[in-house]
Amino acid sequence: MNISEIKQLAGHNLKQVDIKDILYTISTWQVEASSGHNDGWVVDHYLQKIHKVQDALDRINKPKVVT
């Protein structure tokens, strides 16, 4: 998903989020994904969120070919 697709889904009501909030949210997802108290559906839900963030970071950090 690129930035224009994100803006379209969000209706252009995007706001900046503090990095501490982002990291806290991701760490919360990790706790939920690894909790033995959650069933497979809940674990999968949080893992999907983590993977979505990782995929976005991978696209940003994609190596650039210099010629």
Image: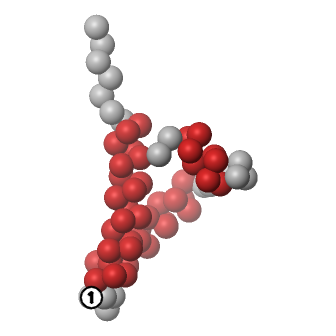
Q: Residue 51 at what x, y percent from top left?
A: 34, 58
What quarter of the picture does the C terminus occupy? top left
- Residue found at the far top of this picture: 67
**Nearest the camera: 12 or 54?**
12
Residue 16 in view: no
User: Is residue 17 rendered to the left or right of residue 44?
Assistant: right
**Nearest the camera: 9 or 38?**
9
User: Is residue 62 rendered to the left or right of residue 11?
Assistant: left
Q: Residue 55 at what x, y percent from top left?
A: 36, 49
Q: Residue 12 at what x, y percent from top left?
A: 71, 48
| Type of amino acid at the residue the image marks with label 1 | Gly
Residue at 41% across, 37% down = 60
User: Is 45 rendered above or below residue 59?
Assistant: below
Residue at 36% across, 65% down = 48
Please count the marks in the image. 1
Secondary structure under tag 1 reads loop
- Residue found at the far bottom of this picture: 37
User: Is 47 rendered above or below residue 17?
Assistant: below
Residue 28 in view: yes
- Which quarter of the picture shows residue 58? top left
Q: Residue 23 at what x, y percent from top left?
A: 47, 60
Q: How is the image coloured?
A: secondary structure
Residue at 39% across, 56% down = 52
Few, some or many C-alpha atoms within 10 Å of disc 1 (few <14, some 14-19, many ≥20)? few
Q: Which residue is mark 1?
A: 36
